[in-house]
Amino acid sequence: MLVLVVGPSGAGKDTLMAAARARLEGDARFRFVRRDITRAPDAGGEDHTAVSPAEFAARRAAGAYALSWEAHGLCYGIPADIVGHIASGGVAIANVSRGVLLEAAARFPTLVLEITAPIAVLARRLAARGRESETDIAARLARAVALPAGLDVVTVMNDGAVEDGVALVLAALSRAAESARPAGNPPHRPPA
């Protein structure tokens, strides 16, 4: 299964996903995907593989991406090797743009993990970053886009303690792992 992580800036996606990744380290069922992005490696934000636009275009043409898209003047790619992981019953978790959700759902068994927070919380978190003016933040928050209909969506309201949000993310990923289990395989049982 492919878990597609979406949500507005300031929702805490990176924080919750980093904590979930740490908790699931060593569990081969889960693969947290490192994206290729045409952004400098020291640009901040998520850990990614920085590629030039020319390198990205060459990789895309060579079939190196299971999914790719453009947003905010950058190109993003999910490595094609997730296909084998998903086919073997694994769960690949990737941060994606809402614009690629329908394409992904048409090609893979998917679960959309929407991480969000109330508008006031988002505004406060964005202001604390100090990267945008109040006007820019208001414009960003006004651009909220609904998810396409017909997708399997789990929404995590990340407006409390980080541990609460992490618990909700882990529950959604556990659900995805059970759904992704190849037919005839028993449920995964953690060691005693």
Image: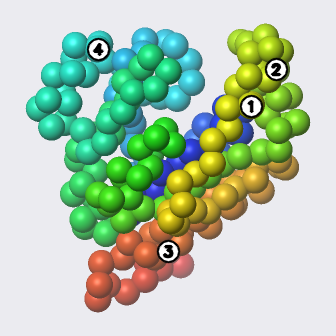
Q: Which residue is mark 1?
A: 142
Distance, label 4 to label 1, CA atoms, is 30 Å
Distance, label 4 to label 3, CA atoms, is 43 Å
Does 152 sit above or below residue 139? Answer: below
x, y percent for residue 13: 63, 41
Q: Which residue is mark 2?
A: 127
Left or right: where does residue 81 sit relative to residue 11?
Answer: left
x, y percent for residue 127: 82, 20
Question: Quick one: SS at disc 1?
Answer: helix
x, y percent for residue 153: 57, 62
Question: Quick one: SS at disc 4?
Answer: helix
Please report whichever mark, 2 or 3, sits nearer to the chain's N-terminal start: 2
Q: Amino acid at mark 3?
A: Pro
Q: Amino acid at mark 1?
A: Ala
Distance, label 4 to label 2, CA atoms, is 31 Å
Distance, label 3 to label 1, CA atoms, is 43 Å
Q: Which residue is mark 4?
A: 53
The one nearer the camera, 86 or 19, is: 86
* Residue contact at pointers 4 and 3, CB within 8 angstroms: no
Q: Residues within 10 Å of mark 1 (few under 14, many from 20)?
A: few
Q: Is residue 20 visible?
A: no
Q: Which mark is residue 132?
A: none
Does 86 sit above or below residue 121? Answer: below
Q: Give the residue displayed 75% in from the left and 53% down from the top.
A: 157
